[in-house]
Image (cartoon, helix red, strand yellow):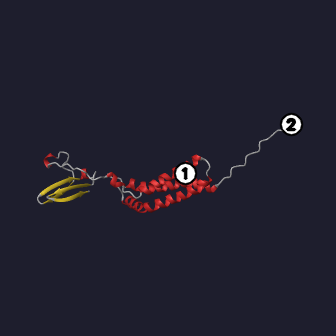
Amino acid sequence: MTNVYVEPRPAAKRFDTARLAAWAALPLLIAAALALVLVPAWVVHPFKPQTREGLELSYALRGWSPLMTVALAAAAVALVVWMWRGTRRWWRKTLLVLALAPLLACAWLARQNHFEWMFSPLARAAYAQAAEASFVEDADMVIAVEVGGERVAYPVRLLAYHHLVHDVVGGTPLVSTY
């Protein structure tokens, strides 16, 4: 009978449900933070019909998002710190750090007014006499102002892109908005 050397079986890797749950929780935290920030931006979308329910949801999320995104980011940081200690592979540690990026971005974005980014006041408005304003059609709605005998009209279709026009009418400074 010949003796044959047999390599001992390596110990089976321990299945750690807590770590697996933590890895599964990170994408859920990211998805929740993204939803808090992106849903209001999607629902309150300029120049498309909006429902009352959608606006209520959007305003509710905008109200809660600053606090909730910080709470979600804090939970993710706690998970990452806990998972970091038991993680040996460099690419997993990289994934842990990368998972924090969207959460921290959402915490910052929840405190921004992204609508102001879309609609900036018109810096140098150009004006035309009514007879020369061929870009204004008869059916266009306008915001009309008369001060001290001077009359101006701001076409809503054009004003909608900037939301604010600073002007002086009849010697009085004003802001026309829509």
Q: Is residue 63 left or right of residue 124?
A: right
User: Does dot 1 land on a helix, a strand or a loop?
Assistant: helix
Q: Which residue is mark 1?
A: 96
The quadrant the C terminus occupies is bottom left
Give how far across and how far down residue 160 sits, in percent. Answer: 27, 52
**Which class describes the residues within 10 Å of circle 2: few (<14), some (14-19), or many (20+)?**
few
Residue found at the far top of this picture:
2
**Which tag, 2 or 1, sits closer to the chain's start?**
2
Residue 4 location, quadrant: top right
Q: Residue at x 49, y 54 (%)?
A: 31
**Secondary structure found at label 2:** loop
The quarter of the image holding the N terminus is top right
Q: Does any portion of residue 34 appear in the rendered image? A: no
Give me the C-alpha separation between circle 2 and circle 1: 51 Å
Left or right: 169 in relation to 96: left
Q: Name the residue at the right extreme.
A: 1
Query: Residue 108, how many percent across, how many down?
Result: 43, 56
At label 2, the amino acid type is Thr
Give amino acid for label 1. Leu
Neighbours of disc 1 within 10 Å: few (<14), some (14-19), many (20+)? many
Residue corresponding to mark 2: 2
